[in-house]
Image (cartoon, grey):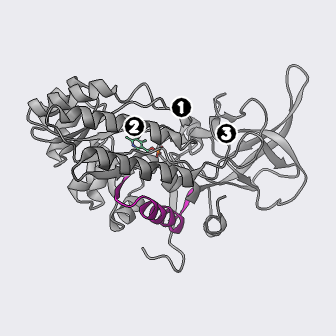
Amino acid sequence: MVEYDSVLAALASVGGDQLVFDLAGIRQRYDSLVRELPGAAVRFAIKSCPAPELLDFLTEWNSGFDAASPRELALAIEAGAPIDRIHYGNTVKSDEDILAAYRLGVRDFATDSVEDVVSIAAHAPGSRVFCRIATSGEGAFWGLSRKYGCSTVEAVRVLVTANSLGLKPSGLSFHVGSQQMTATAWTRAFADVAEVIVALRAHGIAPDHVNVGGGLPALGYLDTNGTPLVPPIGEMFASIRAGMAEVRRVAGAPIGFRLEPGRHLVADSGAIKARVSRFAVRELRDGEREHWLYLSCGKFNGLYELDQVVYPFVFPTHIGEESAPAVVGGPTCDSDDIFFQGRPVVHVPTSIRSGDPVWILSSGAYSISYTTVGFNGFPPLPATFVRPLEGVAC
Ligand SMILES: *Cc1c(COP(=O)(O)O)cnc(C)c1O
């Protein structure tokens, strides 16, 4: 269960439509990762919340960064993170991207194909490369399985090629899929990593690190009945620790670990402060009557993931009042801009009116990235970081 007290206090302390982050909550998640996974260095996945202010704090807390483009690399560098704590974690990059990263001083690249390795050798000579192994994505809301990563056999070929081209075959990585809900996903991925480490030994290659990616879940999402989902976070940590121990055992030499959390770090500490545009009872073509809640923001400015995720909604001026299940829609003229999940899933107080406040909890992950410049003139939500509350050192 997520403790929302400090997020609610943060929401109450600011005015206007915006995305509000409780920095103390992000710090708590960061500390819990460091505590639960000793020996794993944090490389924050920038895309989950690319706010310069957050990157500054994370740098102070000794986090590094997983960046996916020259622009994200530059953001991490501007935040003051040492260059050896920043890696280019995207397997998809052009020759020009690789050269731009090299010129920025980056020497650490993800890869999953021989073609990419050949380009890294040409445009970022002598760099370190880590090869991403594909996972099934099973158990995750977003599988990430097809676009990224290669087979265990191919990973050996990719790193052997890197070695022969003067690159340093420095590591292996995987990503079990975003909002992973099972602990066994990590167990399977670590088994593949162990297999590749053993196979590489025959080629005289010993990676110096394993990157266990992201995928750790937000803890505050609901199912379509409005019941909190309860990801087995303790088991996930245990399964990652067991995997790390197994990798250390088969490696036979000192090996480091990296972790690239995104969603787990920021989702539950971010919330959207919006307003009711209109609450209406609409009669559809088939004569069915449906409640609709139209909000001041939607899929194109903060709620992009609303077609996959059910967030907890709070109607602070109508707590405990009689409610009805409603379809939620954003303000644009786009029919994708709705929150439906096969049936109305959000219970809305029936006396709610245009202009009343609506708070959408656990919506901090990816909401900044998935924002258009202003579909139909509805602008991106500004993001505010509410300073840590007492007792949290930052
Ligand atoms: C998106 C991404 C992450 C973060 O994933 P989460 O599921 O948000 O933790 C980590 N690593 C890579 C390479 C990514 O692309």
The picture places residue 105, in percent across and down from the top left corner, at 16, 49
Q: Which residue is mark 3?
A: 330
Please name the residue shown 67% across and 39% down the image: 330
Ligand 1 is found in which quarter of the picture? top left
What residue did someone put label 1 on?
A: 138
Residue 271, quarter of picture: bottom right
Is residue 155 highlighted in magenta? no
Q: Label 2's element?
A: helix
Q: Give amino acid for label 2.
A: Ala
- Pick the residue in front: 173 or 354: 173
In the image, which residues are magenta?
A: 18-43
First in sequence: mark 3 vs mark 2: 2
* 41 within the magenta span: yes
Nearer to us of marks 3 and 1 is 1
In which quadrant is the C terminus drawn?
A: bottom left
Left or right of residue 3: residue 86: left
The mark lying in front, picked from 3 and 2, is: 2
Q: Estimate how packed mark 1 is, as few (under 14), some (14 to 19) or many (20 or more) residues with alpha carbons within 10 Å.
A: some
Residue under label 2: 191
The answer for how far apart the CA atoms under marks 3 and 2 are is 44 Å
Q: Please tell me whether residue 302 is drawn above or below residue 314 in the rendered image.
A: above
**In this view of the protein, can residue 119 be seen by the observer?**
no
Within-10-Å neighbours for mark 3: few <14, some 14–19, many 20+: many
